[in-house]
Structure formats: structure tokens, C-alpha cells
């Protein structure tokens, strides 16, 4: 910035130090000697200069060992010619509106820059000085007659103009230069424009790309101020919102075969299906032609406004390649009466228009001969087509997209620029002396004003244009930023039509600037489905993104969330754990309550075990009832019927205590179920042991002179049962006092499941209880085993041996089964062991007796009992 400011100051000092000669003024100002160079000229009281690139330039080859060849302008561009005609139309409309600037006519001078910087600067000096020699500070015309200069279309050219014009504070209004640098009023104090700044356009293009979910985007931009600044803003906006740039290549302003091939190869190799193109009009054409030769298809081109309605790439040859393109375009305005004005264009009536003949040749494919003296415009055929231009051709039959009343985008900007200057002149002319804006409240004279005085009014101008929209300039010299969103549709005739599918208005509230009719968009290959352009497909809920090494953030792998973690959004970068009482669903996309596992009565397994336990307890109760009913029979009285009653009652309780293990764990049930089971079972086993001991005592007491007769009373069973049971009671009480069991929800034991269980608190106490019960069972088994062959008709020892064998088998198999299961199945194993061992005692000890009591009453007699006993002794 310091260097530029210094150069501007030096330029100003040099220019101000130069003499300012002024040539004599005639009624029409100085005569321009080379009208071909000047272009389209119309004389008026006040002149509006303009720089419009009607042609494209071509730089001649030079070795720089001699004076460089001049720039040639061989290519006539019909679209830009219409820009010049829109300026003429606006001034003609103003001049015919007598109430707008009464008694004052506007004239214009249109200089063709051919998009060449050197011609832009030459034309600017020419307009300023009115002299072919283009001498700075040399005025060959009344300075007050030059109101302002309109142009140029390119940002680079406009900056050069603005640097020069800013020294004199000459108002400059550009109709197509959109570089953000031109908003700097410190560098370009007299620059204004009727096209929005690229800052807004670039932000809008980034929003357009993101609206369709395109995150993997290529970027092409021209090597000029327009392309470089615009591409940088687009890139910054895309990166800000998480998109990535697949590649960024710059398009040379001077065509280069090597560079063209390189860009084509990059586009061809890239996996990006969307390419943002921030380019001026003609520079992209060589690359497009090369892409067509390489048959590159399936790309969506997102175009900036300078290229989105370009005629150079909308030809039938490139139609298939470019169809489906979408982009921003300058807001399309309406100019009523413009078509009628265009139809009046004719070489015979527009003698001051040096471009009209070239347009005529292009429109009707004919050629003029050079007129000689005052001959008519009819000329001999010297053209390659063999058709001479006669002047009799009719424009009514000429059909051209750019020579019609449609697509008035840049033309409308030129139209607004002229009206901005005209409104400023009218405001200046309407100034009331004594109320003016200048020193001592003076006004500027419309006949003799300084450039800076008109610049003041232009900056403050505010009016409603023909579209009914308010036109003004903000503090940076920019107009309201409004863009059309257009889509390139391929027509049946193979041509491209521009369809308006949306609008971008920066004046709308944030987030509501863009409106798009997606259903109206026709994508490449005439598809209506929105294409995709991503480096990696989205990671769905249940997974997370993991960046690929050495690649942009948009290139990633999708990794499933770890066990116990979820992600509930697309393209999540992290997974997070569920709360302790929840667990991921199968897709790991949301947390759901963990499945609560417990052995409930509602489950089939719980129901079956409960039914079996109740059924077995009923059978036991029925057996007890039989024994009570037939308590006076010999079999019931044999082997201590009181112990049989106690044992049956204990077995019934053991069946019922298994119900404590089914259902929701409660503090009471957790506290009681294991001790109740342990005490009841020890009571059962102690009863069995007492019965076995009594069998042995009874057999030995029948021997002569036996000392065991005194032990036949109830004392031995009571002591045996009481001592054995009290020891188990002591173990259980100690357990409950020191570490009582409690209900808990175990969330760690089984993945995704809350096991609602009773925590036994002390595994040592549990195994001590079970161990003591097992020890007592082993003693009972050994005693019964030793007494199994005693000669007695109803010797219970052999049945007790079987019962204890079954009892021990069940509980020995219980240990590995119990330790290898979890949750409700662990409880089911214990219940099964309780029911099985209890059923073993019931079946082995009491069912044989019930058989004799109910089915063989003939054998349930004292004689039969004693007979069999005597027989066996014999």
C-alpha cells in the first residue's frame, strides 16, 4: 500500500507540474482526427466518456529487438456491441425527456479498449484531453463538458483507469468491474460501479456450492485481479464451512498450450464432479475446447457472473459439455423501448457508429467494400461468402440471443450507470444558491463544474430505476448486490438457453439471501437428480470420521463407534459413551435403556420353575398327608415317623424357598433367600442323618445285652438335628450381620444388559454355607452307605443312600454350572439344584413307602414286617 501511494503522489506531482494548454473551442468541441480510433461519438452539451471492449485483442509475436507490433482487435463481439448501444439508448432517452435535464443535451464518446490494458489507458487519456496525442493535462475541449467516464468492463483495466482518474477526482462508473480491491476509497477515491463487488458474489457462490452438499470442489480462476481475488474469497468461504478444494488452477490471460494441457489433465484426473469457475469471458475457451477433445463429461460447472452468460462457451459445439452449468448472473433488468431502438440501427443512419458495419457483416454474413468519396454503402462483393452487403437487409428477421430484448444484464448496468450520472447532473442543476453543499453553501454550475463537484452528487445519488428498484451507492461505491441464479439448459436444437432458477439478494436477512427452485434445474446430461461431489461418502450415524493421512479433511474413512459409544448425526467426528443405564442400539446411532435381565415370573423359564416348585411342594404336602393319615401303620411307624414328618415338612419348605429366587430382587428377599435355603437344606440333611443313625441304633439294639437300647428314644434325633441346624444358623447369622446381601443393578457383568440381582456381598460366607451343607450330606451318605445292607424288611438306609447319592450328584454338578453362568441363568441353576435335590430326597425316601401304604396294604402289616425280618435272619 505504501509503494502504491508513493507512486500515485509522484504521478500527481508530475502531472500537476506539466503545463495545461487549451486549444481553441468551437461549438462542438475539438474534432477527433481518427474517428476509427475513437469509436462511437455523439456531441452534446455535456459529454459522458465510456470505455467498452467491443472487440477482443490479439498480441502480436515480437522478439523485443525492435519496436513492438501494435495490438490488433480482430474479433468483433456482438454482445459487447449491445453494451455500447444501451449507452446510446439511455442518453437518447434522457435527451428526449425534456423535463429531466431541460435545455441540456448529453453526448457520449465510446472508445473500444479491446480488453487490452494499453488501449484502456490510451482511451482514458484521449477522453480526458480530447486530443489524438493523448498528452496529460492537455485539454482540447472545455473541461466542463466531460461529466464522467463509464468503464471499463475488466477489473484490471478499471484499476488502471481509477488510479489516473482518481488524481483528478473524475467520476468513474464501471458497469462490469467487480474486484473487491476497487472498494478501497483510499486508493480509488472517484470509482463507483453498478455491478456488485466480487466479495458478495464469491460468498454467494460458496453458499450455492454448500446448498447442494458439494464438499469436494475444483477451482479455476483467471490470472487477473478479477479471478485471483474472487477465487481467494470463494476458497476462504468454502474452507470456513467445511468444504475442501480438490485443486486450484489459474487460467492464463495469454493462451498457453502447455498450461491448457496441464489444466485439462488436472480436471480429467480429479474425482471432483463440481468445478467453480471464476473467470472472465474469453480466457476459458481454449480449455473448454481441449476438454471437449478429451471427451470430459459429468462435470458441473459453477460459473461466476463474468462467464455465466458468456456467448463464447454457449455454442452448439460445447453445448453437451456445458449443459447443466449453474452460476450467478448480473440481475436481469428491463429496458422498455430498447428493442425498437436496436432495430433502428443501420449503417446509413448511424454514420458516427464505426462498429455498425462490422455488426452488419456478422449479422448477415456479408461484407462491405470501402466506400469511395460519397458513394452509397452498396459495395461490390469482395467477401469469402460471395454475398455483398447492400444495406437492404432487415434486422427484424435477424435472430440473436444477444441482439434481442432478453438477457439485458450488463446492458442494464450500463443503462443504470448513465442514469446515475444523469440524476447527479440533475441534482447539481437543481441546487439552490445559499443552500449548496460546497464552501459557503455554494452550488456548482451545470455550465462550469469541477469533476469533484459532480463526484459529490454521484456518490449521494438515489433513484428508482425502470425495474422499480432503488439504485444507490454505498460508502465503498458499490450498488445493492442482487444476482440471478441461472442454469444452462440444453435445447432440442443443440443450443444452450439460460434459465433463471433462483435469486441471491444480499439485502435479505442473514440466512435468507438465497432462493432456489431446485426442481427447475437441469443438470448435466439432462438429469434432474442433484449430482454428488464428495471426496468420501458421508459417515452415517453409528460411525465417525477418521482423516486419511496426507489428504484434506473432506477425505476420510468411516469407522464404527466403539462398544458402548454412539454417534447420532451424519459425518460425526466423534463418538460418545452412553449413560451408565443405557446402551447403544444395534446401529449405534442412539442410546436406549439397557435390557434389564432378571428371572421373573413373566418369563417362560421363571414360570416353569415356579410351577415345578409349587407342584413338587403340593406332592410333598400330599405325601405328608398320607403319612399323617396312615401314621399308625407299621411302615409309617418304622424308622421314626416323627422324623419323617419333619423331613417332609422341610422338603416342602425347600421347594417353596426356591420361589424367593424368582421375581424382582427386594431387600427382604435378598436378605432371606440364601440363609433360608441353607438352613432348610441343612435341616433336611440332618433329619436324614438322624434317621440313618436311628436305623443303625435300632438294628444293634435288638442284639442281646446291647448297650444301645437306651439311645432308642427321641433324644438322639433331637440332638443330631438341633446341633447340625444350629451350626448352619450360626454361619448364616454371622453372614447377615457382617455383610448382608442386597439388591443391585449390575451394568458391567454383561454387555448392554442390566442384571437385576441380589449381591451376596460375601462369596466366602456363601461357600461356607454350601460347604457345610455338602459336608453334612457326605456324612449322611457315608453312614447310610454303611447301613444299607442291614437285614431289615423296611431298611431305609439303602433308600437314604440313593437319595444322598442323588443329592451329592446334583450339588457337585451345581458348582461348575453356577460358576459358568451369569445373571438369571445363574439363579435358574441354583433353583434347579434346589428342586432336583429336594425331589431326590422325596422320591428316594418316601415314594417306596407310599407305594406299600397305598398300593400294597397287604404288606403293611406287623406280621408281614416281622415275617420278612425273620425269614431274612434264617
Image (cartoon, rainbow, N blue to C red):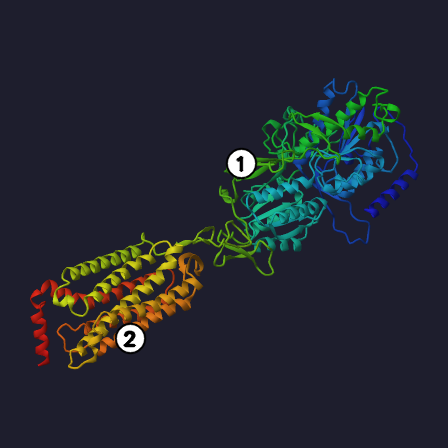
Count of numbered tags: 2
Q: Let me know if residue 820 appears in the view.
A: no
Q: Residues within 10 Å of mark 2 (few under 14, many from 20)?
A: some
Please state the horizontal and vertical placement of residue 650, each as a whole percent of the image: 26, 63
Residue mark closest to the camera, 1 vs 2: 2
- According to the picture, the residue beneath numbered tag 2 turns out to be 779
Q: Nearer the viewer, residue 220 or 869?
A: 869
Please state the horizontal and vertical placement of residue 504, each as a whole percent of the image: 61, 36
Tell me the residue at 47%/59% (across/down).
563
Q: Nearer the viewer, residue 694 or 325?
A: 694
The answer to whether 144 appears left or right of 742 in the picture is right
Q: Which mark is residue 707?
A: none
**Element carrying mark 2:** helix
Q: Quadrant of residue 863?
A: bottom left
Please state the horizontal and vertical placement of residue 707, each as a whole percent of the image: 21, 80
Q: Residues within 10 Å of mark 1 (few under 14, many from 20)?
A: few
Labels 1 & 2 near each other (Cβ < 8 A): no
Comes first in the chain, label 1 or label 2: 1
Q: Quadrant of residue 813?
A: bottom left
Please state the horizontal and vertical placement of residue 396, each as a whole percent of the image: 60, 27
- According to the picture, the residue beneath numbered tag 1 turns out to be 517
Q: Let me know if residue 396 appears in the view.
A: yes
**Element carrying mark 1:** loop
Q: CA distance from mark 1 to mark 2?
A: 92 Å
Q: Nearer the viewer, residue 46 or 243?
A: 243
Q: Look at the picture and state if 21 lies above or below 808.
A: above
Amino acid at each position: 500500500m505504501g509503494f502504491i501511494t508513493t507512486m500515485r503522489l509522484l504521478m500527481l506531482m508530475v502531472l500537476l507540474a506539466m503545463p495545461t494548454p487549451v486549444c481553441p473551442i468551437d461549438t462542438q468541441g475539438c474534432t477527433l482526427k481518427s474517428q476509427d480510433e475513437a469509436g462511437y461519438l455523439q456531441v452534446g452539451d455535456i459529454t459522458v466518456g465510456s470505455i467498452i471492449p467491443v472487440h477482443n485483442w490479439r498480441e502480436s509475436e515480437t522478439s523485443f529487438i525492435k519496436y513492438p507490433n501494435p495490438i490488433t482487435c480482430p474479433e468483433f463481439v456482438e454482445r459487447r456491441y449491445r453494451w455500447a448501444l444501451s449507452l446510446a439508448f439511455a442518453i437518447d432517452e434522457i435527451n428526449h425527456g425534456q423535463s429531466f435535464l431541460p435545455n441540456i443535451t448529453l453526448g457520449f464518446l465510446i472508445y473500444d479498449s479491446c480488453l487490452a490494458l494499453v488501449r484502456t489507458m490510451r482511451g482514458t487519456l484521449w477522453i480526458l484531453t480530447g486530443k489524438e496525442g493523448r498528452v496529460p493535462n492537455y485539454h482540447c475541449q472545455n473541461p466542463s463538458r466531460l461529466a464522467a467516464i463509464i468503464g471499463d468492463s475488466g477489473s484490471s483495466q478499471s484499476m488502471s483507469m481509477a488510479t489516473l482518474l482518481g488524481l483528478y477526482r473524475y467520476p468513474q462508473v464501471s458497469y462490469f468491474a467487480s474486484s473487491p480491491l476497487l472498494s478501497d476509497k483510499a486508493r480509488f477515491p472517484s470509482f463507483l460501479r453498478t455491478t456488485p463487488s466480487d466479495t458478495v458474489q464469491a460468498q454467494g457462490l460458496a453458499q450455492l456450492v454448500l446448498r447442494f452438499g458439494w464438499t469436494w470442489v475444483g477451482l479455476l480462476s483467471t490470472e487477473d485481479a478479477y479471478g485471483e481475488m474472487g477465487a481467494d474469497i470463494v476458497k476462504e468461504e468454502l474452507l470456513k464451512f467445511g468444504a475442501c478444494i480438490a485443486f486450484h488452477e489459474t487460467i492464463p490471460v495469454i493462451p498457453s498450450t502447455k498450461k491448457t494441457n496441464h489444466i485439462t489433465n488436472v480436471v480429467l484426473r480429479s474425482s471432483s464432479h463440481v468445478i467453480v469457475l471464476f473467470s472472465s469471458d474469453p480466457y476459458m475457451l481454449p480449455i473448454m475446447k481441449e476438454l471437449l477433445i478429451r471427451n470430459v463429461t459429468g462435470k458441473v460447472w459453477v460459473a461466476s457472473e463474468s462467464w455465466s452468460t458468456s456467448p463464447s462457451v454457449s455454442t452448439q459445439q460445447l453445448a453437451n459439455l456445458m449443459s447443466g452449468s449453474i452460476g450467478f448472473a448480473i440481475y436481469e433488468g428491463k429496458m422498455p423501448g430498447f428493442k425498437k431502438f436496436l432495430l433502428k440501427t443501420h449503417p446509413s443512419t448511424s454514420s458516427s457508429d464505426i462498429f455498425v458495419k462490422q455488426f452488419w457483416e456478422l449479422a448477415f454474413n456479408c461484407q462491405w467494400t470501402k466506400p469511395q468519396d460519397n458513394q452509397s454503402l452498396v459495395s461490390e462483393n469482395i467477401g469469402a461468402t460471395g454475398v455483398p452487403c447492400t444495406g437492404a437487409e432487415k434486422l427484424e428477421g435477424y435472430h440473436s440471443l444477444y441482439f434481442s430484448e432478453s438477457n439485458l444484464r450488463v446492458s442494464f448496468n450500463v443503462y443504470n450507470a448513465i442514469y446515475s450520472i444523469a440524476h447527479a447532473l440533475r441534482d447539481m442543476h437543481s441546487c439552490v444558491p445559499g443552500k449548496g453543499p460546497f464552501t459557503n453553501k455554494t452550488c456548482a454550475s451545470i455550465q462550469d463544474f469541477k469533476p469533484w463537484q459532480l463526484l459529490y452528487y454521484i456518490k449521494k445519488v438515489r433513484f428508482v430505476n425502470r425495474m422499480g428498484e432503488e439504485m444507490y451507492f454505498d460508502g465503498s461505491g458499490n450498488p445493492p448486490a442482487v444476482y440471478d441464479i441461472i442454469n444452462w439448459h440444453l435445447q432440442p436444437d443443440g443450443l444452450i438457453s439460460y434459465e433463471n432458477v433462483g435469486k441471491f439478494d444480499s439485502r435479505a436477512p442473514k440466512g435468507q439471501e438465497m432462493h432456489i427452485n431446485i426442481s427447475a434445474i437441469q443438470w448435466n446430461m439432462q438429469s434432474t437428480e442433484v449430482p454428488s461431489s464428495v471426496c468420501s461418502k458421508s459417515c452415517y450415524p453409528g460411525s465417525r470420521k477418521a482423516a486419511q493421512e496426507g489428504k484434506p479433511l473432506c477425505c476420510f474413512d468411516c469407522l464404527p463407534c466403539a462398544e458402548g459409544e454412539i454417534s447420532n448425526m451424519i459425518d460425526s467426528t466423534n463418538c460418545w459413551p452412553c449413560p451408565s443405564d443405557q446402551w447403544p442400539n444395534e446401529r449405534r446411532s442412539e442410546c436406549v435403556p439397557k435390557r434389564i435381565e432378571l428371572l421373573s415370573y413373566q418369563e417362560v423359564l421363571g414360570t416353569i420353575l415356579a410351577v415345578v416348585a409349587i407342584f413338587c411342594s403340593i406332592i410333598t404336602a400330599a405325601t405328608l398327608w398320607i403319612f399323617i393319615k396312615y401314621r399308625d401303620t407299621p411302615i409309617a411307624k418304622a424308622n421314626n415317623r416323627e422324623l419323617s414328618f419333619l423331613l417332609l415338612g422341610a422338603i416342602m419348605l425347600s421347594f417353596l424357598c426356591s420361589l424367593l429366587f424368582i421375581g424382582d430382587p427386594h431387600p427382604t428377599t435378598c436378605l432371606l433367600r440364601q440363609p433360608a435355603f441353607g438352613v432348610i437344606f441343612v435341616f433336611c440333611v440332618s433329619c436324614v442323618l438322624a434317621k440313618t443313625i436311628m436305623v443303625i441304633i435300632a438294628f444293634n439294639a435288638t442284639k442281646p445285652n446291647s448297650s444301645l437300647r437306651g439311645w432308642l428314644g427321641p433324644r438322639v434325633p433331637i440332638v443330631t438335628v438341633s446341633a447340625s441346624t444350629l451350626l448352619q444358623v450360626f454361619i448364616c447369622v454371622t453372614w447377615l450381620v457382617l455383610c448382608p446381601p442386597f439388591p443391585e443393578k449390575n451394568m458391567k457383568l454383561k454387555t448392554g444388559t442390566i442384571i437385576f440381582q441380589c449381591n451376596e456381598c460375601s462369596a466366602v460366607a456363601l461357600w461356607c454355607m454350601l460347604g457345610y451343607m455338602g459336608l453334612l450330606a457326605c456324612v449322611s451318605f457315608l453312614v447310610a452307605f454303611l447301613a444299607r445292607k442291614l437285614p431289615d424288611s423296611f431298611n431305609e438306609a439303602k433308600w437314604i443312600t440313593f437319595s444322598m447319592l442323588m443329592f451329592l450328584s446334583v450339588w457337585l454338578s451345581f458348582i461348575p454350572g453356577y460358576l459358568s453362568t451369569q445373571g438369571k441363568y445363574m439363579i435358574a441353576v441354583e433353583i434347579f439344584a434346589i428342586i432336583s435335590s429336594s425331589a431326590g430326597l422325596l422320591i428316594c425316601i418316601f415314594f417306596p413307602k407310599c407305594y406299600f401304604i397305598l398300593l400294597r396294604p397287604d404288606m403293611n402289616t406287623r406280621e408281614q414286617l416281622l415275617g420278612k425280618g425273620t425269614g431274612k435272619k434264617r
